[in-house]
Image (tube, grey):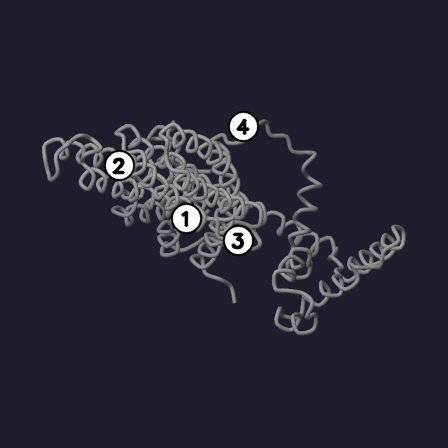
Amino acid sequence: MALSIRENMDYSQVQSDKEAQIKEIFYMRRKSFFVSVVLAIVLVLTVIALYIAEAAVASMIIHSFLVLAIIALNLLFFRFPRFFPDIRLAASLTVLGLYLLSLGLILELRVPSIFTILFLSYAIAAIYQEVRSNVLNNLALFFVGITIIFRFPEFFHTDEGITPDTAYLFVFLLVFVALLSISSFILLKRKRYFFKQLGRIKEREHKVIDMVFRLRENYAGHSFDHEDYYDKMESFAAEFSRHIGVSDVFKERIAILREMGDAGPEELLKKYSDYSIGDLRELAQLELSKNRKMRYVAFQASQAPHVEISRKDMFAERWYPTLNHYKDSWEVKVVAFAVFYAVLKTEKPLSRSITDREIMEVLSLEEFTNLVHPSLLEVFYNNTNKFLEIIEQSYAKGGGQ
């Protein structure tokens, strides 16, 4: 049964969001390594500060151990994604650990200048640029700050209770955290938009490759023979193992790949008890009857030598399709939207025109509400009947063309 316009768009949105999430997690893992390097520097500075302040050895050991624990946490999530897949958890735990460290150093050193370590912790935690850790970062900065202002007023040489000095510090902290929250929200929104665009590009790329495969199968009579591929891979693996003088460890894995097209993971786990669900997921990346990932990679590799993109153009705005370029005038945006609307209403060789109800559904999806200027969409919604009248008159004059 054919999917409706909305179902197709929803599926496309899910796929592009999935790609965006994969890329975001990938870059977060790289940032976790950078955080570990920064924390290593913080560890050295912490030991030096405690030594100069003549702190107790036990205090130096506790604070050093806490920093080392945060570093180890980030390195584990960076180095072993298979066992620690949720990098967002590492970011949140790092935020809590940093503010626990900051609070401990403030109580240990008890000088007004050490209060700035809270802002250092905020800056380190902000490296992740992730929603959950960012909210936690802002809340932790605010609550730890007001705890010190009201619970330990002697740090700032103020009296206990609410005084003009403590009120001033509280207002300053409140405004400061509010400004940081707004700026971080803008950065996160821009980053999410960027990753969504990358995800949509990847999803469209897969659609184009799928279309090439279908055209080749339907019109060139060339269908991919999975079994022949597995036979050749098995022959190559056997010859390779014989040549280097080891047993053929690939044979059983190739047999699993053959069965993956029909058998589910539960059946395979029963038959091949030496393998875990993680092993089967890794092998599934090489399976060809259902998962075309290796065919995508091969096709992309075959086309890569013919594609040239300069580093300067890699993130240029023109690579992201939109009808809402900030450089375009209002007239250009109106014409672009009119052309877009006319294309949806026009019969094409490979796709039908869509109804007015379907057009309204498409324009209500997030992918298109971000594509078109909000004021232009509002004009369209408020004057839909006028648009339909103009279209009908134009089609009548053009003989339906």
Is label 1 or label 3 in front? 1
Q: Which residue is mark 4?
A: 313
- The circle drawn on residue 7 is none
Q: Which residue is mark 2?
A: 177
Q: Which residue is mark 3?
A: 84
**Residue at the spot x=19%, y=34% of the render?**
154
Q: CA distance from mark 4 to mark 1?
A: 37 Å
Is residue 400 visible in the rendered image? The answer is no
Q: Position of residue 377 (x, y in %)?
A: 31, 43
Counting residues from the N terminus, which is met first, the one under dot 2 or under dot 3? 3
Is label 2 or label 1 in front? 1
Q: Is residue 253 above or below residue 96?
A: below
Counting residues from the N terminus, which is met first, the one under dot 4 or under dot 1? 1
Q: CA distance from mark 2 to mark 3?
A: 31 Å
Is residue 217 visible in the rendered image? The answer is yes
Tell me where residue 53 sits by quadrant. Answer: top left
